[in-house]
Image: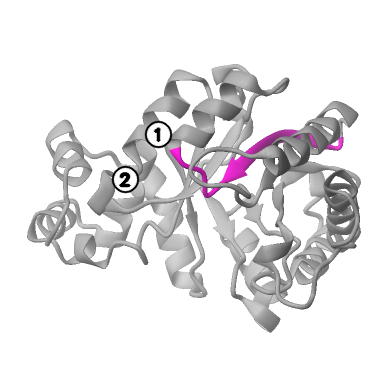
């Protein structure tokens, strides 16, 4: 994957976790507000992927074709599910991946995914045999053309280095939760930048409430006529991330997208990059 592929990704992604019965309505609202990237997973415990699919059908009926949207889903290992496992947990891992992926295509009424991620490694702190078997199956999906990009979520720097070094097809995307208190996942971000891997950051607001309350961040927001939330999202973009937002508010969706219209200076970036406490 070359650095140029970053141009094929949206600058902001709408996340659909924990939206339950409101999923379809919220996806429609997000796309109407200007989002083109949608993140989901075939994990009924936290996502209603079939309702994302309902939204995609409705949008297609309104003239917004599937090709205009960037749809990302995930394979979730069995221990990440409740009783609603969308594949045969007694099957071999490669079959589980295949079944889950086909289920995602059916849920989403599509014949391809723009991005497909392993929701999280099986092993800690490194990678085990299960991770390699699952990654091989995900590589096959990429080679088939049904997944345009492949990657991994909830990954640490050791795991990412191993995967990048030893995989036949290197990870192209990382999606991690970002904590300001640990440097906004700096080690993984730096590695991604050096290896032309797209970095997606989630929980940028919910994991960092002290950042929104920080006097320095609030001062930046006042001087720019923006909200602290917008400042954090703008920081994430300038730090090399594609941010995810899961807001249920149409107003906040529109405000979030306005972060593409301003920039932070180096002093602002440095202040936010190095926040570790209130």
Q: Which of the 4 image quadrants contains residue 190? A: top left
Location of mark 2 (residue): 184
The image shows residue 135, relative to residue 61, as above or below, that is above
Q: Quadrant of the N terminus?
A: top right
Judge the density around disc 1: few (<14), some (14-19), many (≥20) Cα neighbours within 10 Å: many
Q: Is residue 8 left or right of residue 233?
A: right
Count of labels in the image? 2
- x%, y% of residue 10? 58, 41
Q: How is the image coloured?
A: one colour
Say which of 65 and 47 sits in front: 47
Badge 2 marks a residue whose secondary structure is loop
Give yes or no for residue 147 being in the magenta stretch: yes
Q: Residues within 10 Å of mark 2 (few under 14, many from 20)?
A: many
- Most distant residue in the front direction: 129
The quarter of the rendered structure image containing the C terminus is bottom left
Secondary structure found at label 1: helix
Does the magenta stretch mainly form a helix, a strand or a loop? strand
Q: Position of residue 222 (x, y in %)?
A: 14, 59
Could you tell me residue 14's position as x and y percent?
57, 58
Mark 1 touching mark 2, by CB under 8 A? yes
What residue appears at the point 18 percent right and 35 percent down from the top-left corner?
265
Residue toward you, 90 or 102: 90
In the displayed structure image, the side of residue 212 where residue 171 appears, left or right: right
Write down the residue under mark 1.
189
Q: Residue furthest bottom?
A: 21
Residues shaded magenta: 146-156
If you read the primary sequence from the N terminus, does the residue marked by circle 1 or circle 2 appear first? Answer: 2
């Amino acid at each position: 994957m070359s650095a140029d592929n970053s141009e094929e990704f949206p600058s902001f992604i709408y996340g659909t976790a924990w939206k339950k019965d409101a999923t379809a309505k919220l996806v429609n609202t997000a796309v109407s507000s200007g989002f083109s990237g949608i993140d989901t997973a075939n994990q009924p415990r936290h996502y209603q992927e079939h309702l994302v699919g309902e939204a995609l059908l409705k949008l297609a009926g309104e003239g917004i074709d599937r090709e205009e949207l960037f749809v990302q889903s995930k394979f979730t290992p069995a221990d990440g599910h409740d009783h609603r496992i969308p594949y045969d947990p007694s099957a071999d891992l490669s079959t589980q991946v295949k079944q889950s992926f086909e289920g995602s295509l059916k849920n989403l009424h599509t014949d391809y995914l723009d991005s497909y991620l392993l929701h999280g490694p099986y092993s800690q702190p490194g990678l085990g045999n299960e991770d390699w078997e699952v990654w091989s199956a995900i590589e096959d999906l990429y080679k088939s053309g049904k997944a345009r990009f492949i990657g991994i979520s909830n990954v640490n720097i050791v795991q990412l280095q191993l995967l990048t070094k030893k995989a036949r097809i290197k990870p192209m995307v990382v999606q991690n939760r970002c904590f300001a208190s640990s440097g906004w996942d700096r080690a993984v971000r730096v590695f991604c930048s050096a290896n032309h891997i797209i970095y997606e950051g989630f929980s940028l607001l919910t994991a960092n409430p002290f950042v929104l309350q920080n006097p320095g961040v609030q001062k930046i927001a006042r001087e720019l006529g923006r909200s602290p939330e917008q400042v954090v999202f703008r920081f994430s973009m300038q730090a090399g991330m594609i941010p995810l937002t899961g807001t249920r508010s149409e107003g906040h969706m529109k405000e979030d997208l306005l972060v593409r219209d301003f920039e932070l200076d180096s002093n602002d970036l440095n202040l936010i990059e190095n926040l570790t406490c209130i």
